[in-house]
Image (spheres, helix red, strand yellow):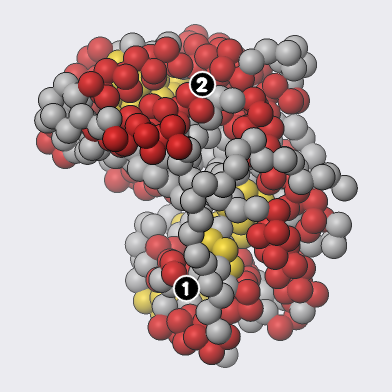
Amino acid sequence: MLQYPPEPFRIKVVERIKIPTMTEREQLLQKAFYNVFNIPAEKVYIDLLTDSGTGAMSDNQWAGLQVGDEAYACCRNWYHFEDTIRELTGLKIVVPVHQGRVAENLLFTALDTLGKIVINNNHFDTTRANVLAHGGIPLDLVIPEGRDILCDHPFKGNMDVERLEQTIREHGPEKIALVMLTITNNSGGGQPVSMSNIRAVKEVVSRYGIPLFFDACRFAENAYFIKLREPGYATKSVRGIAREMFSYVDGCTMSAKKDGLANIGGFLALNDEQLAERIKTELVRIEGFLTYGGLAGRDLEAVTRGLVEVLDDEYLEYRIKQVQYLGELLLANAVPILRPTGGHAVYLDARRFAPHVPPEQFPGQAIVVELYRRAAVRAVEVGSFMFNQTDPVTGEALHPPMELVRLAIPRRVYTETHLRYVAEAVIALYQDRNSIRGMRIIGHGNSSLRHFVAQLTYVE
Ligand SMILES: Cc1ncc(COP(=O)(O)O)c(C=O)c1O
């Protein structure tokens, strides 16, 4: 059994958290229409809803807030931000945004995506929604192992390079607006993409003149997995590995709420000047001036310092092992999880966890609700409830290949005891799994991002 990794930091500020009573939790669930996005955060004991924007900043980042320059244009933090991202990615043009989905919106507005295909290993939900909103067709081409919950492949986020080439040939390169690699692959279990896969994808798209972008939210965790698992990288620094990863792409979208170790922020970085001009015009219209993009000067500084801190090998070792530790506690008690554990979360396999609840009754969501009810732990469903897709011909609901519950671990926030508490709650629920009941949607079910807003009740 893996030992809990010693934290490479100590705690300077604490935040009180409380477990609401069982009666309170039951009332809150009813009031929230069994959608945990509607539960007040103060009524959650351990919040594993997301690792996005929920991390703890360091003393160095907090100090950075104090040197925020709040000039409207060309504040000093912008130059620090721009230089750091250029140095990290080797990409020439940096566009600040307040979070990742704005970067996606700007990119798909500026690219001509109408009627064209956007290929990804797996589109994250906001990326998919942005592609669709701009008339594009999102296509997921992760390797088959990436859809197999039990397969222990070291790089389950890899793209199926053969299918990529087939798809380009079948439709013609002019029909492919963009190829993206989401690192790590959040919707596929936080699984990494190998350097050799990045290189192979680059080789194919270059032959057809198609741009390659990263959805780079968790680039540092991805780089650390390469160091751990890919031959030839064990002695390289994560910074060097990250730089090599970025050297193969034409650009990236980034939510700094993950590996920027900040509570808000993001950017687009790219080399294509014409594309960048279109993006910048749109940026000024919807987000803010070119040197702040919806962020305060102090936020730019926090992100900049976070992007440097995140590439500390000792931090990344602790981070990846912390997630693995929770996964191993569950596996030791036969709880079905997606294997191997990913970079930022442990994913429960809802199909095997609650096999008596069919996909149309959202087994993952039923588990999420039960975890809150029993332990005030908040998780998120990543399955039929999140991915609202229907067959274009028959109109029938299409179910994704995996029904998952994501236990996302905020960075530098929870201790070993907190994770043990979570593991005990999940194990107890698994042992009582026959009591889990299916659910149905009773409101706001048609939104493309319905898991944020839909209302549910139990199936009779
Ligand atoms: C892979 C991936 N892409 C894009 C986003 C969107 O980023 P944001 O929440 O900052 O808009 C997320 C957020 O969780 C993500 O995980």
Q: Can residue 419 be seen in this view?
A: yes
Residue at point 16%, 39% (across, down): 286
Would you identify the image quadrant in which residue 227 lies? top right
Q: Earlier in the sequence, mark 1 or mark 2?
A: 1
In the picture, measured across the screen, residue 276 lies left or right of residue 11, that is left
What residue is pinned by disc 1?
43
In the picture, measured across the screen, residue 88 lies left or right of residue 282, that is right
Q: What element carries label 2?
A: helix
The type of residue carrying mark 2 is: Arg
Q: Is ligand 1 within 8 Å of the beta carbon of the residue shown at mark 2? A: no
Would you identify the image quadrant in which residue 228 lies? top right
Q: Is mark 1 on a helix, strand or loop?
A: helix
Would you identify the image quadrant in which residue 98 lies? top left
Q: In this view, does 144 lie above or below 404?
A: above
Residue at point 52%, 46% (across, down): 12
Q: How far apart are marks 1 and 2 (CA)?
A: 53 Å
Q: Which mark is residue 277?
A: none
Q: Nearer the viewer, mark 1 or mark 2?
A: 1
Q: Where is residue 39 in the image (x, y as percent from the top left)?
A: 43, 72
Viewport quadrant of the C terminus: bottom right
Residue at point 57%, 35% (across, down): 184
Could you say which is closer to the camera, residue 107 or residue 102? 102
Q: In this view, does 359 lie above or below 273?
A: below
What residue is pinned by disc 2?
169
Mark 1 Cα within 10 Å, few/some/many (few <14, many 20+)?
many
Q: Is residue 366 above or below residue 301?
A: below
Could you say which is closer to the camera, residue 440 or residue 452? 452
Q: Can residue 396 be seen in this view?
A: no
Q: Position of residue 298 (x, y in %)?
A: 28, 35
Q: Position of residue 297 (x, y in %)?
A: 24, 32
